[in-house]
Each structure stands twice: as structure tokens, then as C-alpha cells.
Amino acid sequence: MSFTLHGIGVSGGYAIGRAQLYSHARLEVPHYVLREEHLAEEIARFAEAIEQVRAEMLSTRDHIPEGAPAELAAFLDLHLMFLDDSMIAEVPKQLIQDTRCNAEWALAQQTEALIGQFEAIEDAYLRERKHDVRQVADKILKALMGHPGHAPLKLADEPSVLVAHDLSPADMVLFKRQTFAAFITDLGGSTSHTAILARSLNLPSVMALHNARGLINEGDMLIVDGVAGVVIVDPDNTVLEEYRLRHNQWRLEQQKLKRLKTSPSTTLDGIEVELLANIDMPQDVHEAMEEKAAGIGLFRSEFLFLNRADLPSEEEQFEAYRHVVEATKGRPVVIRTLDVGADKSLAWLPQASVNPALGLRAIRLCLSEPQLFLTQLRAILRASHYGRARILIPMLASLAELDQALALIEQAKDSLRQDGHLFDEAIPVGGMIEIPAAALAAEWFAKKLDFLSIGTNDLIQYTLAIDRTDDAVAHLYDPLHPGVIQLIRHTLAVGRRLKKSVSVCGEMAGDPKLTRLLLGLGLRSFSMHPAHLLSVKQQVLRSHVGELTPQATKLLKAGDPLRIQALLERLNG
């Protein structure tokens, strides 16, 4: 019987193949109370499981297949870091001691507590790290219960689609050794490490299907539509033929896109468009350079602060920033200062917030913790001596905040001069426009800054008063809402008038369906995930800005959603 499953398309494209189920089912966790004299032995059993998993991970990392994405080793290192974190490696031992429970139960309790803390994080990327916690904890649990790290996969004679409840970076090593047309999972999101790897491999994939592993049988014929986030199980011949055509067309387009890597990013009427890459980790810079990005438009520095009880030192941050700056070889690198919310999972935060999206986060947090901010600023400034680093201040809402931030940058410069460190005295400083008030006041911000960057994800959230983490209102999240488009256009107009560069670094920048609209509104600098660079460049090469501008203006005046959609299709036609 044919049926359809809906999830999140994390890597575009189409695939057709037979289902190959990945045995990664969750284990039932036993719970029992131990006698006092057995506690030391139970704690030792838990420590032994940790060591076993560490040995497995190190072995996996040492045997990564040739040609695997560069991120794979980095993600395995991250899982090793999780494994060593006291929240996973030590707290369960204390639980065993305090409550006299068995090791499996102590681990399960601590895992659920950690995941609850991650789920409260407002930032989507950081929130997705809960899957990494789950994956590492599952490996320890399997070691405790005597299960193998993973089940072997069968070689298939025809294209296969991997169907899993969840996949970890270590699973992906095994996955890389096989030939799969696509993969789908019950868990995960668009910023999970599995999704990032899927995009690196350029394989169609759909995640967050919830119960695909339970509904799909081994050998079922599957269509994976990574564009729409749909999986069709046992399709009829008509649907199958339609998707075969789409699949062939997609493969041809992928081949054509690769030819664009070295093409200049220029419109048909000769306007140069800057295509930059967003990165989360220092290692990501290599993929960005491989895709011929013009530079790094957004380096989310918060990754360096995640999943640890202590703060990264100035030296540790400096080495991370310098690595990226040097790897870009003279291209610009925009480093966003710490952008995290008031969340319990970050031990050093002073307090929790009842509403992280509106609470003490981003620049508000940094200004309340000046020593923390100064340490990061010193590290960025020191890295600027090795290339074209830029500082980006997130979530500006008032000029008072900006003045305080600029004063602290000057203070960091003074301290570096006193210490004899070299840095770029004229390092550009920019601000993120992601609050409606900041967009409307963009002129005053732009006069004090060197550049602006529009963070469309938060701008949409705050403009439409929609918590983008809340599934109940997710359908109201609309990048084409007239209010959102007006704020973007206004910010771009301010930049043109004051001759200050303005980029867009949110999801809108990497959506090729919106490229021509943004060009028509006046955008000349896009920053996106490296995997989207070529498809956006393709749109740039097809565009004539002189013709797009009046069409974009017409769309600005349309209030009805259906009318807006029709005008967008005409603009893209």
C-alpha cells in the first residue's frame, strides 16, 4: 500500500531506491537498586563503558574512508568531547552513589536532564546538539548492556535508501563505506550534524519523520524528495515515472552547477554579487573555500563556548579565529561575537531566563559580562593580524548598547597595545539587524558602524511575533510577509544611501527561490551554508537586476499572500 511521510528536507534532490533498515533501535533501560557494598563496582562498570566507547570512537576516527567529508573527523572529535564532559562522564557516577541505582538508569536520568536543557535553548543550532548528547549516551548504554556499536549493513545490488531512527557521525563513517542513494531518519533537524554531513555529501535526505523506522519495511520501494521533505513508500507507476524524470533532471542540474564554481558571480547586466559562506566550526572553512566562497560572511563563534563547564581561554579562541582567517587567504571573515541565550546548559551563565528569545542573550549578555566579552574581543583582534577579520555584534536594539560595545572594543585594543600584541587597528565593526526596531533605526546604527548584516531568521521571528521553535505556530513563519520585506528593503536602502555594505546571512540568503527577489530589492552580498552557494550563484548569473527591480517593487506593494506568491513565481520565471 502506498503512503506518504512528511519531515524536513535537509538536503535537496531526489532519490529512488529500496529501503534498507538500519538497526539502531533504542534499548529498554533497566532500573534496580544496589546494595551499598556494590556501588564502587557499579561506578567502575560505568567508567569501563566510557573507556570502551572512547576506544571505539578513536578507532572509527582513525579509519575514516578516503573522500569522506572533512567535517566527519570534526564531528567525531565533538562526540569525544561530549564523552569526556563531566556532565556525561562524572554526574552519572554521583547519581549511582547518591541514589544507589544501576549505571544504565543513572545514565538515562542524566541524559534526559541534559536534553531538557538543550531543548530550552533558543538558538536552533545549539538546540540541535541534543541529538549529539543522545547519540553519545546511546553508545555508552549499548556498551553497558553488551550490545555492539552498530549493526552491519548489507551490500545491495540496486540503489538503497538508508532508513534509521537516528544516525551519529560515527554511523556516517559506516554509511560512507556503502553506496546509498539517500537516507531518512526519525530524529534530527536541519542543523543537526547528520544534516550537515548529508549536505556535504550532496545526498537527498529527509529527517524528523518521527516513525519512519517503524512504518517502513525492509525492501520497500521509496521515493525521497529532499526538496519538499517528503518520502513516498511503495509509489504507483505513475508517481514513480514522474519522480524518475525529476531525478534525472536533478542529476543533470547538479553536474551543471559544478561548472559554475570558478565563474565570476555577476548578473547579466554586469553587477557583481558577493557570495559568502556561513560556518559554525573552524573546520567548516575548508568546505567554504572548496565551494569558492568569496569569504566567510558569518562565523558563529558560540560553538567554541558550547558543551563545557568552563569558558574557552583567549588563547584557545585566538587559535580558532586565526585558523579561519589564515585559511581564507585574504578573503574577509566576519566573526559574530558570542550569541547565546540565557540557558541553564551553559554553566557560566548568571541566570536562566523565562523567555530566552527576549531575555539576556547575544550582545545583552556580553555587556552584562564585560570580562567575557573583552576576552573574546582580544582574541578576534589578535587574529586580525593574520588576515581580514571583521567583528559582528549580534542582536543590537539600541544605540546605547552599540556605544557600550564600541567602547569595549576600544578597551580591548588598548589592552593589546599595552601587551605588545599586533592587530588590525582599522578592523571593520558591523551590527546585525534582526530586531524590527533595529531595522527601522538602521540609519543611526549604520552611521556608527562599518557594515550591517541582516539576520533574517530572527528578524522574521520578532517581526511576526512567532516563536520559531514552537511547532504550533511554525506554519505562520513567513519570509515573504510584507512587513518582513519592507524591513529588509528599508535596511538595504539605508546602506546604499550611507555607502555602507549590507549583507543577508539568514536562511533567506541560501534559498534560490528568493535570490532574484533579494537582488531586485538591492541586496549585493549573500551569506549562506556552503552547500547552497552554487545554486544561488546560478540564479545570480540568470538575473538582470535592471529588470528585476520594478518587479520586486510591485511585489512590495502586494499585501495578499496569494498575490505575493504569484508575483514571486513570475519574478523567478
Image (spheres, rainbow, N blue to C red):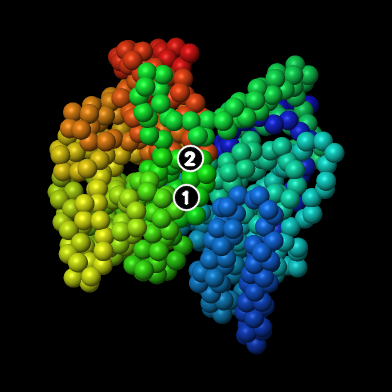
| Secondary structure found at label 1 | helix
Q: Residue at x 28, y 25 (%)?
A: 489
Q: Residues within 10 Å of mark 2 (few under 14, many from 20)?
A: some
Q: Position of residue 279 (x, y in %)?
A: 45, 48
Q: Is residue 399 above or below residue 509?
A: below
Identify which residue, 115 or 556, lies in the foreground.
556
Total tally of numbered discs in the picture: 2
Q: Residue at x 32, y 52 (%)?
A: 389
Identify which residue, 128 or 374, lies in the foreground.
374
Q: Position of residue 320 (x, y in %)?
A: 41, 60
Marks 2 and 1, how far apart in space? 11 Å
Q: Which residue is mark 2?
A: 292
Identify which residue, 406 or 306, lies in the foreground.
406
Q: Position of residue 66 (x, y in %)?
A: 68, 53
Q: Is residue 497 above or below residue 161?
A: above
The part of the image, by quadrant, that contains residue 369 is bottom left
The answer to whether residue 23 is left or right of residue 355 is right
Q: Position of residue 261 (x, y in %)?
A: 52, 34
Identify which residue, 22 or 267, lies in the foreground.
267
Say which mark, if any, is on residue 285: 1
Type of the residue with mark 2: Lys
The part of the image, by quadrant, that contains residue 503 is top left
